[in-house]
Amino acid sequence: MIYERPSLTQYITARLVTISIFVTIIYSLTITAVPIEYQTNWFHIGLFILSLLLILFSVHIGAKKVKRELKIVENYLSGVNNFSNPEAQFFTYEFEQINRKLIQILKKVKRNNSKKRKYTAKIKLKNRQRSDMLSAIAHEFRNPISSIMGYAQTINDDDDIPPTLRKKFLTKIYNNGEKVEELLSRLLLWNKFESGEQRLHISRFNIQPLISDIASNLEDRYKNRVVLVDKRSLIIKADRALIEIVIKNLIENGLKYSKDEVKVKIDRNKISIIDRGVGISPENIDKVTKKFFRTEEHSWDNSMGLGLAIVKQILKLHNSSLHIKSQEHNGSTFFFSI
């Protein structure tokens, strides 16, 4: 059986009626019990004062109850009590309703504050990431731009520079310009991933010739280096341009971090890029695919720590993932299925 609390009006009315009946009974019993010769004016005044005292005492008790319930409300507002306090018993319907509404409002405020804190933390994280990105950009662009300016100034200041040296400097300027272009391309591509704008353009093609072309171009860039590619064909359905970025980044990684040949194996639907370079320490294997992260042994690289992060995002778009096996000083194997 659920106890239904009275309204404040019902409570006051019931209390006044109870007091009136009680005072009337006391008055009647007193009049009946006291002989009429003792019922003087002072006697009746005393009974009247006693009745007032009883009424005031009853009002005092009611006021204390109201004060107690207002204190509960005050504790809710000040955060002293938990919202679901089982000891919070209210004697009138109005206070019970105020209590329920107040709990609903405070819980909503608490949820909003929690969302606000999460949003603030997210904004701080974004600002910190933006600051890290700007620092990475400033650091990585400084070297190629300084080289371009240095070689260009040398050519500009010396009119008698030998043609062979001039050509060498112009080649250096061109190569550093390519580095700047590559850095900008990585930034633009990563921005598309961050904003969710990158879309797949699926086609069906043989990945083996694509890998061979990439390997040949990188061998021209990295002189006296060899990339061995399996001759096995593999027809896949994927975004050709994005898969080209994946293969290029992984092979170039192997060329940068090793002095020996780099192998590309095609086994059914699995592509593996194997090098015999410096390797990756166990504590860093799970970190190398995070943006802006570079290990101490790879700190000289000019990829802004986005190379493997981009590879991971591209493979994720293809419902695949990048796997890494590595041992320090014994090389690494990067592989994925598609």
Image: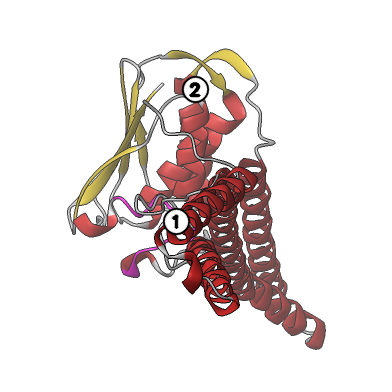
Decide whether residue 288 is among the magenta residues: yes
Residue 327 horizontal/vertical position (percent): 17, 52
Q: Residue under label 1, please give it.
A: 32
Foreground pick, 138 / 107: 107
**Secondary structure of the residue carrying numbered label 2:** helix
Most common SS among magenta residues? loop
Q: For the point 68% across and 49% down, which residue is it?
A: 188
Q: Residue under label 2, please give it.
A: 209
Residue 277 horizontal/vertical position (percent): 26, 55
Q: CA distance from mark 2 to mark 1?
A: 121 Å
Judged left or right of residue 174, residue 84 is left
The type of residue carrying mark 2 is Pro
What residue span does the magenta drawing correspond to? 286-296
The type of residue carrying mark 1 is Thr
Judged left or right of residue 338, residue 241 is right
Above or below 48: residue 161: below
